[in-house]
Image (spheres, grey):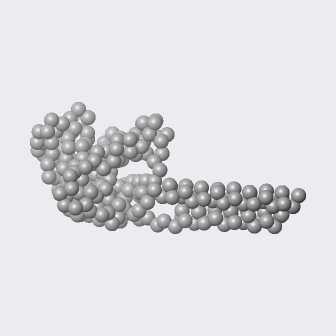
Amino acid sequence: MKKMMTAALALVLTLGMGVTAMAASVTKTVNVHNVAVSISSVVDKDGNAVQGATVADASEAVKAEAFAQATSYMNTFMNTSVDMLATKDVNLAGVSAANPVTITFNVEGVAAGNTIIVLHKSSTRGWEVMPNVSVGNGTVAVTFTDLSPVAFLRPTAAAAAPANTPVQEIHPPEYYEQLKAMYGGNTAEAAAAPVVSPKTAEDSGMAGFVFGAALCAAAAVVVSRKKTV
């Protein structure tokens, strides 16, 4: 019976090691680009056109900060590598929580249906992930309550939707509340509600398989003992 128990435990340990190896086998990178970005339009909260917004390349120091934030975001929330399309310094006087603006950017290579993550360095909150990002063919629209550096991220090899796909909100608000908690927000509920990525779900499924194998092994040992008795 000891031999059977040893064999059963060895099987379970082998399967468990396989789960660890699978979880560690994913290699992800942040691929830095500098695609063309310009401003298509700016409107205030009432839909009125606003003039004076500018966009320029961010400094190397800011690009390094954005790269670190993109890496953290990718490792925490994504199962693929990420293209950091561009990091830009966006400025417009008078923008505040009471006077927000929605800026539609022209972003080279973006297509409707792409998942675009916009990182923003707020002058008061630090780096944050912007909610309610809308993506069209060649455009990305975001609403700001202050303006400073902005980085545009996209999962590597993102598949483009057919032309003329309607502009859409990428994620529900609850998703962004969790991201805000990670990037300096103060929402306690968000901090207590972790996001489960597809990779985590896969690993959980394999862990369940290992647990099932352990139960089967234990049952086999019990049956063997009864037969021996």
What residue is drawn where x is 34% and y is 41%? Answer: 173
Asked if residue 97 is positioned above or below residue 176 in the image, the reply reads above
Vertical order, 167 against 48 (above or below): below
- Asked whether, in this view, residue 3 is left or right of residue 207, the answer is right
Q: Nearer the viewer, residue 182 or 20?
A: 20
Q: Residue at x 24, y 53 (%)?
A: 135
> Farthest residue in the top direction?
98
Residue shown at 34%/44% (left/top)? 172
Q: Give the vertical position of 111 relative to 149 (above or below).
A: below
Closest to the observer, 30 or 165 = 165
Question: In the rendered image, is residue 198 in sight?
Answer: yes
| Side of 3 relative to 104 (left or right) | right
Residue 180 visible, this angle: no
What residue sits 32% from the left and 53% below the top? 117
Q: Quadrant of the C terminus?
A: bottom right
What is the tally of numbered marks visible in this picture?
A: 0
Residue 30: percent from left, percent from top: 38, 63
Of all residues, the one furthest to the front in this rendering is 227
The image position of residue 59, as x and y in percent, is: 28, 57
Q: Image quadrant of residue 152?
A: bottom left
Farthest-out residue, right: 229
Q: At which x and y percent is residue 185?
A: 40, 40
Quadrant placement of the N terminus: bottom right
Residue sitting nearer the eye, 182 or 149: 182
Image location of residue 27, percent across then percent down: 46, 66
> Taking 34 as reference, is 12 left or right?
right
The answer to which image quadrant residue 213 occupies is bottom right
